Image (tube, rainbow, N blue to C red):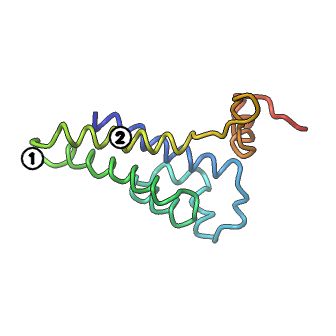
Amino acid sequence: MHCLCGMVSEMAVVFIFDLVADVSDLNSLSPEDKEIFTGRRYETFGQKRRIDTLLRIGVIPKTFAKDVDKVRTVRREYLHFLSKDYGDIEDDACECYSATCRAIKSLIGLPLGDKGKIRIPRHLEKYMASKGIIEADNS
């Protein structure tokens, strides 16, 4: 469970970088921050650096950062430390699952429009159109 939640959380963070790179005005960023998006350098970063960077440039809320960082920390302990005490494995799995669900829910929490239709925010519509997932509404 920890590994699966770790993968989902990590890909959510990479998705946010990809979204920012595709639809944001990168000229508003410092030269150092703009460089991060050149050639998708962020994909080579560790998860902690990705989270810290997105938080620093104001792209993600602290609650999202806290949730994905919790998953990162727990996953790291189980995968990289032989001395990890497995006595809390069930509680840790539940905590990771809950944190991942909260993070993904906040990531895809789309507003409802008329008659319960989902309204896709303009930046997400632009991103999906750039990937060929939908046709952009040019109205």
Secondary structure at badge 2 equals: helix
Residue type, label 1: Asp
Q: Earlier in the sequence, mark 2 or mark 1?
A: 1
Return the x and y of residue 82 as percentages of the image width and height.
11, 46
Left/right of residue 47 with respect to residue 94 in the rendered view: right
Q: Residue furthest right?
A: 139
Viewer-side residue, 109 vs 115: 115
Q: Which mark is residue 116?
A: none
Q: Which residue is mark 2?
A: 98
Q: Give the mark toward the camera: 2 or 1.
A: 2
Return the x and y of residue 55 as percentages of the image width and height.
50, 62
Q: Which residue is mark 1?
A: 85
Return the x and y of residue 110 as percentages of the image width and height.
63, 39
Secondary structure at badge 1 equals: loop
Q: Residue at x 37, y 45 (%)?
A: 99
How far apart marks 2 and 1 lie (CA) works out to 21 Å
